[in-house]
Image (cartoon, rainbow, N blue to C red):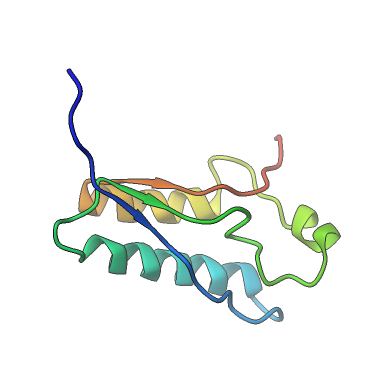
Amino acid sequence: MARWIRVSTVSYTPVEAGENFLERQREKLAQLAELAATARPKPDLVLFPEHCNVSGLPTMEAQMEAAEPVPGPTTERLSEVAVKHNMYIVVPMPTRDG
């Protein structure tokens, strides 16, 4: 049976490229997902923009080089937030096979 769901979208400025970029970006995404979860009514689904985990890297080549496997560090971290708040999170990101 169909039901209504609440959807939140996230728009943000990525962290600056540099040392520990991926870790800092991952934590920013987690913080933004936590913030989205505080909306009332609480969202069932939180949507991030394309390449959200590598946005801010200077070139497309650098973004592709930073691709992660799934499951991987970013999906694991955001899964923690999703479980904590009983919601789904969509993370469109470049992925690495294996």
Residue 66 in picture, x, y percent from top left: 73, 57
- Tell me the quadrant of the picture where the C terminus can be found: top right
- In the picture provided, is 28 more to the left or to the right than 83? right
Residue 38 in picture, x, y percent from top left: 20, 66
Q: Residue at x 50, y 72 (%)?
A: 12
- Tell me the quadrant of the picture where the N terminus can be found: top left
Q: Residue at x 38, y 68 (%)?
A: 32
Q: Residue at x 40, y 64 (%)?
A: 30
Q: Residue at x 66, y 62 (%)?
A: 54
Residue 47 in picture, x, y percent from top left: 42, 51
All told, the count of numbered labels is 0
Q: In the image, is residue 84 above or below residue 15?
A: above
- In the picture provided, is 65 more to the left or to the right than 33? right
Residue 55 in picture, x, y percent from top left: 65, 65
- Residue that sits furthest to the top in the current view: 1
Compare residues 97 and 6 and report the one nearer the observer.
6
Q: In the image, is residue 39 above or below residue 42?
A: below
- In the picture provided, is 95 more to the left or to the right than 79? right
